């Protein structure tokens, strides 16, 4: 995983997360092919690799979200902008 000291641009984190998601999907497809060919050992190895890629993708996506949130917070401080609903959660309607 990338260290915070190696700061990437906001889109770089998202791009790397997307690449790992693609790698995980490819490994899953290949695992299915090997399982279908009765090569269960290789299929299992590819399934484990897919899981590792998926975990890396998830971590990078979380990092991208933190970087984006930090960027938004800094931009709001600089511009003096206030969001009406910063959590992004919908308000429940009162009955």
Image (cartoon, rainbow, N blue to C red):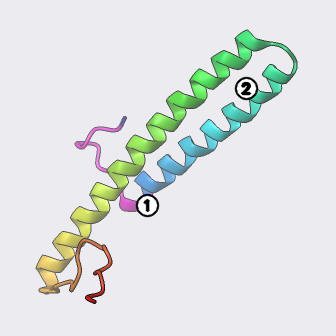
Q: Position of residue 94 (x, y in %)?
A: 25, 88
In this rendering, the answer to whether 1 lies above or below 38 is below
**Sequence-earlier tag: 2 or 1:** 1
| CA distance separating discs 2 and 1 | 30 Å
Around disc 2, counting alpha carbons within 10 Å, would you say few (fewer than 14), some (14 to 19), or many (20 or more)?
many
Q: Position of residue 89 (x, y in %)?
A: 30, 73
Please state if 57 lies on the left or on the right of 81 as rendered.
Answer: right
Please state if 27 lies on the left or on the right of 53 as rendered.
Answer: right
Q: Residue at left 67%, top 31%?
A: 27
In this rendering, the answer to whether 39 lies above or below 30 is above
Label of residue 11 in the image: 1
Q: Quadrant of residue 85?
A: bottom left
Q: Does residue 56 belong to the magenta stretch? A: no
Q: Which residue is mark 2?
A: 31
Q: Residue at left 37%, top 60%?
A: 10
Secondary element type, mark 1: helix
Q: Quadrant of the N terminus?
A: top left
Q: How many marks?
A: 2
Please state if 57 lies on the left or on the right of 6 as rendered.
Answer: right
Q: Residue furthest bottom?
A: 95
Around disc 1, counting alpha carbons within 10 Å, would you say few (fewer than 14), some (14 to 19), or many (20 or more)?
few
Q: Main secondary structure of the magenta part?
A: loop
Q: Which residues are magenta?
A: 2-11
């Amino acid at each position: 995983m990338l260290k915070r000291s190696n700061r990437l641009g906001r889109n770089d984190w998202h791009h790397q997360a997307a690449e790992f998601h693609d790698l995980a999907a490819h490994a899953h497809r290949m695992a299915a092919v090997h399982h279908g060919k009765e090569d269960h050992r290789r299929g299992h190895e590819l399934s484990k690799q897919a899981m590792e890629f998926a975990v890396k993708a998830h971590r990078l996506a979380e990092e991208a979200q933190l970087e984006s949130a930090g960027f938004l917070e800094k931009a709001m401080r600089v511009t003096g902008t206030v969001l009406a609903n910063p959590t992004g959660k919908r308000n429940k309607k009162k009955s």
